[in-house]
Image: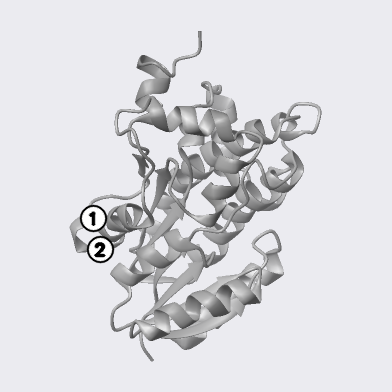
């Protein structure tokens, strides 16, 4: 049996990281939609990777558990790339919290029980998590350590407190990085590592939805007033993922890497700062 890289979310970012860390390994590619999975699997297979596919609903524990079992049955789970999620323009607040926050907690719990010694994972968070105002220490701890199946019952996440999709997304992505920090302690006991990457606007089909959606003008302004004055590419996120998952990143765990062309810097200290 070969080592296995599990890619959850068959989009461009997940593929870009997988291509850099999966040579000689089996790639198990999973997505909610089989057509997305099949398309990505064909691209990877044509590039010489050994690929199989599965469908997964990250907001369902039985579904995530089944994926972890399927991965372990194929070999040592040496890598996990969690890139599935929904954006503010795609879903209501409760869906965003269920998929992006609860779903990530499920992936971390289930694959934390399946990851092989020496294995590593990256979770794709977002620059949005960095633009949420400071939470209390108690709120940080709750997002980081509340058992996954109790997460959505937290008072701070109730519908009367989270009424806007962007706020839900920011909370979810802040929660992802906090959760990974806490999970890194547990994963370390298995000899494994886990980190988050927080991309800014990376040109993918999802980003195109955002740039042409109701918040499009704001996103275009973000790019124009950022230090890099452009969007990023999946390959640039892939390079960071390869560092975090590979031997050069062996001392990095429980960390978050912001890769946003300086948008967050400009938001706090530049022309994007709120008036």
Closest to the observer, 88 or 241: 88
Residue 215 location (% of width, % of height): 61, 33
Closest to the observer, 250 or 19: 19
The residue at the point 44 percent across, 19 percent down is 272
Instruction: Determine contact: label 1, label 2, CB under 8 Å.
Output: yes
What is the CA distance from the residue labelled 1 to the residue labelled 2? 6 Å
* Residue at image mark 1: 249
Instruction: State left or right for residue 270 relative to residue 62.
Output: left
In the picture, the quarter occupied by the N terminus is bottom left
Q: Is residue 101 above or below residue 129?
A: below
Furthest toward the right, the residue is 160
Residue 255 location (% of width, % of height): 35, 44
Instruction: State left or right for residue 142 relative to residue 257.
Output: right
Q: Is residue 228 above or below residue 237?
A: above
Numbered disc 2: secondary structure: loop
The residue at the point 59 percent across, 29 percent down is 139
Instruction: State left or right for residue 64 relative to residue 186.
Output: right
Residue 199 location (% of width, % of height): 42, 44
Furthest toward the top, the residue is 275
The residue at the point 31 percent across, 61 percent down is 245
* Residue 73 marker: none
Closest to the observer, 208 or 238: 208
Closest to the observer, 89 or 161: 89
The residue at the point 62 percent across, 71 percent down is 65
Which color scheme did the rendering employ for the protein?
one colour
Residue 86 location (% of width, % of height): 63, 51
Dot 2, how many residues are within 10 Å of its Cα: few (below 14), some (14-19), or many (20+)? some
For residue 207, say whether it is visible. yes
Instruction: State left or right for residue 71 relative to residue 158.
Output: left
* Residue at image mark 2: 246
Dot 1, how many residues are within 10 Å of its Cα: few (below 14), some (14-19), or many (20+)? some
């Amino acid at each position: 049996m070969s080592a296995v890289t599990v890619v959850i979310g068959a989009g461009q970012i997940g593929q870009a990281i997988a291509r850099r860390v999966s040579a000689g390994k089996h790639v198990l590619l999973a997505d909610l939609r089989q057509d997305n999975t099949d398309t990505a699997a064909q691209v990877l297979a044509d590039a010489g990777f050994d690929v199989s596919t599965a469908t997964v609903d990250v907001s369902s524990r039985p579904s995530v558990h089944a994926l972890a079992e399927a991965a372990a049955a194929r070999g040592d789970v040496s890598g996990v790339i969690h890139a599935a999620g929904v954006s503010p323009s795609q879903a209501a607040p409760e869906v965003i919290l269920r998929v992006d926050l609860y779903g990530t907690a499920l992936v971390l719990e289930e694959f934390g029980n399946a990851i092989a010694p020496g294995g590593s994972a990256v979770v794709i968070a977002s620059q949005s998590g960095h633009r949420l105002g400071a939470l209390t220490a108690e709120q940080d701890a709750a997002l980081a350590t509340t058992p996954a199946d109790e997460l959505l019952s937290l008072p701070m996440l109730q519908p009367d407190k989270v009424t806007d999709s962007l706020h839900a997304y920011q909370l979810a992505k802040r929660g992802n990085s906090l959760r990974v920090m806490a999970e890194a302690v547990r994963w370390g006991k298995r000899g494994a590592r886990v980190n988050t990457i927080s991309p800014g606007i990376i040109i993918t089909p999802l980003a195109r939805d955002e740039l042409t959606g109701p918040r499009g003008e704001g996103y275009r302004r973000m790019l124009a007033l950022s230090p890099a004055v452009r969007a990023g590419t999946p390959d640039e996120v892939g390079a960071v993922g390869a560092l975090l998952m590979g031997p050069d990143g062996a001392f990095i765990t429980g960390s978050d890497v912001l890769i946003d062309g300086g948008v967050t810097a400009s938001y706090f200290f530049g022309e994007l700062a709120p008036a």
